[in-house]
Amino acid sequence: MTLASQLTMLRIVLTACMIGLLFVPGFLAKALCVVLFLLASMTDWLDGYLARRFHQVTPFGILLDPIADKILVLGLLTALIPFALVPVWMVAVIVIRELLVTAARLSAARRHVVIPATKEGKQKAAFQMATIFLALLALVLREVFDAPWLPSIEQWLHVAIRGCLWVALLLTVSSGISFFWRNRWVLLRLSRP
């Protein structure tokens, strides 16, 4: 397994740790969750960079990287629902799109066809990650401050979270439609026995 693929696997492990930490009360757990999220986000960039730099791009890595991204994003967005920071219906739309695209990619991979991530998908992922970062930051602020000015900061963060989530949702739906349209012939060919 290449170093890039190991970093991708690390992102999956970090996601499990972050989800667990979200439900541990106190500032330290929430702050550690933010640090791990930043680390996981860096591995997302670093694994691709290392794979290209050292010519270690593999079909396994091309397939695993977007799956690790989906585990990170979907796991954390779903875990944030009980904190009333993201609406259930918006997360449900994102989850459905991601599962459909992942199922199509896995179906193609079984027939030795790799459908790589696109620029649109990366833009969508950036807004999803920004939403998660702002939501984690809001949780840290809830733990740290008990001051009269906190509600205004938290209100601003809620507006920022909702704005990022709306953009992420629109990009998620549009990139999903684009994915299936662009790959329609490949997917139709693969659906035949």
Image (spheres, rainbow, N blue to C red):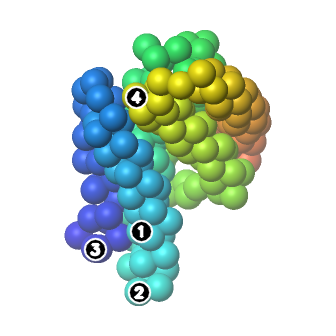
Residue highlighted by disc 3: 2
**Along the viewing direction, whichever of 44 and 96 lies nearer the viewer:** 44
Give the mark nearest the N terminus, 3 or 2: 3
Can you tell which mark lies on residue 143? 4
Residue highlighted by disc 2: 54
Classify mark 2: residues with Cα within 10 Å, few (<14), some (14-19) or many (20+).
Answer: few
**Residue 69 in the figure: left or right of residue 90:** left
As measured in the structure, the alpha-carbon distance from the residue carrying label 2 to the one carrying label 1 is 11 Å
Q: Amino acid at mark 1?
A: Asp
Can you tell which mark lies on residue 47? 1
Q: Amino acid at mark 4?
A: Glu
Are the two marked residues, 2 and 1, in contact with CB atoms closer than 8 angstroms?
no
Residue furthest to the bottom in view is 54
As measured in the structure, the alpha-carbon distance from the residue carrying label 3 to the one carrying label 4 is 39 Å
Can you tell which mark lies on residue 139? none
Q: Which tag is nearer the camera, tag 1 or tag 3?
A: 1
As measured in the structure, the alpha-carbon distance from the residue carrying label 3 to the one carrying label 2 is 10 Å
Q: Secondary structure at mark 2?
A: loop
The residue under the point 41% across, 62% down is 43
**Along the viewing direction, whichever of 126 and 186 lies nearer the viewer:** 126
